[in-house]
Amino acid sequence: MPFPPPDTPTPVVFPDGSTFQGTVFLNAVLDHPNLSIGDYTYYSDDEMPDVDLMRRRLFPYLYGDQKIEIGKFCSLAMGVSFVTDSANHRYDGISAYPFAIFDGMSPDRASMPRHSPRPMRVGNDCWIGRDAMLTPTAQLGDGVIVGAGAVVSGRVPDYAIVAGNPARVVRMRFSDDEIARLKAVSWWDWPIDAILAAEPAICGGDIDALERAAPSKV
């Protein structure tokens, strides 16, 4: 069975030919000016909700200004949510009550939240566990694993495993030298046939073999 192209809405096909409706390649079904999602990044749910409901579960505050950038080959589990700064309340004054949202949300109102010019970012090849929440300051590097139920803020280094509320680095997946080599090889930018040919090296953690398999031109 050929590997599905990245514009396939429901890419999981069982041996009997039926399609699992709960796993979707996100950039095949979502089109929003605040979203940038790389090829083959998927979201999985127990059952496929309609697209609008799925978007509201994952990205409930896209009506604001902050953008979300997600790399290629990321895995997003059921219940993951990206909470942009449109969900924030001002808390630098006496009250955090959002008066402005009840009568027009004029951007010059004193109670409107202050927006960050920096997008939320998730690197390539990240795995975000069930019911994890990413807050407006989240900046995840490549190869990050986020534990189930974690609440992630701020910068997470490449190839870190984080868990908890607030999320903290549990351990690094590779040494500094190995991370530099993985960043240099950037397998997620290869043609899909080259990636599939290197699957044993990628999933087996063989960086030497992965470097040898790298296409001469990417």
Image (cartoon, rainbow, N blue to C red):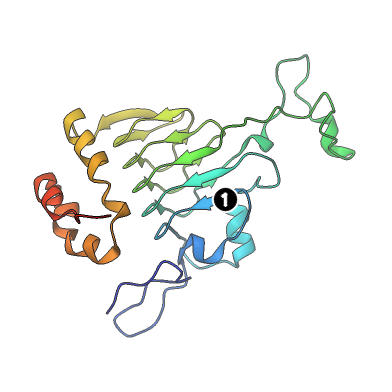
Q: Position of residue 5 (x, y in %)?
A: 38, 71
Tell me how many marks there are: 1
The answer, for residue 173, to whether it is visible in the render is no
Res 34 seen here: yes
Relative image position of residue 169 (x, y in whole percent): 33, 28
Q: Residue furthest bottom?
A: 16
Quick one: quadrant of the N terminus?
Answer: bottom left
Which percent across, then down, holds residue 194? 22, 62
Q: Quadrant of the C terminus?
A: bottom left
Q: Residue furthest right?
A: 103
Residue sitting at x 70%, y 27%: 114
Judge from the rendering whether residue 206 lies leftward or rightward of residue 218; answer left or right.
left
Residue located 47% across and 55% down the image: 78
Whether 141 is drawn above or below 110: the answer is below
The residue closer to the viewer here, 212 or 179, is 212
In the image, residue 150 above or below residue 216: above
Q: Is residue 208 left or right of residue 25?
A: left
Query: Could you tell me the amino acid type at mark 1?
Result: Leu
6 with respect to 60 (left or right): left
The residue shown at (57%, 34%) is 136
Q: Quadrant of residue 39?
A: bottom left
Q: Residue at x 29, y 77 (%)?
A: 2
Q: Could you say where residue 116 lies in the image, as x and y percent from the top left?
A: 63, 30
Q: Few, some or many C-alpha atoms within 10 Å of disc 1 (few <14, some 14-19, many ≥20)? A: some
The residue sitting at the front extreme is 217
Q: Secondary structure at mark 1?
A: strand
Depth check, front residue: 92 or 73: 73
For label 1, the residue is: 35
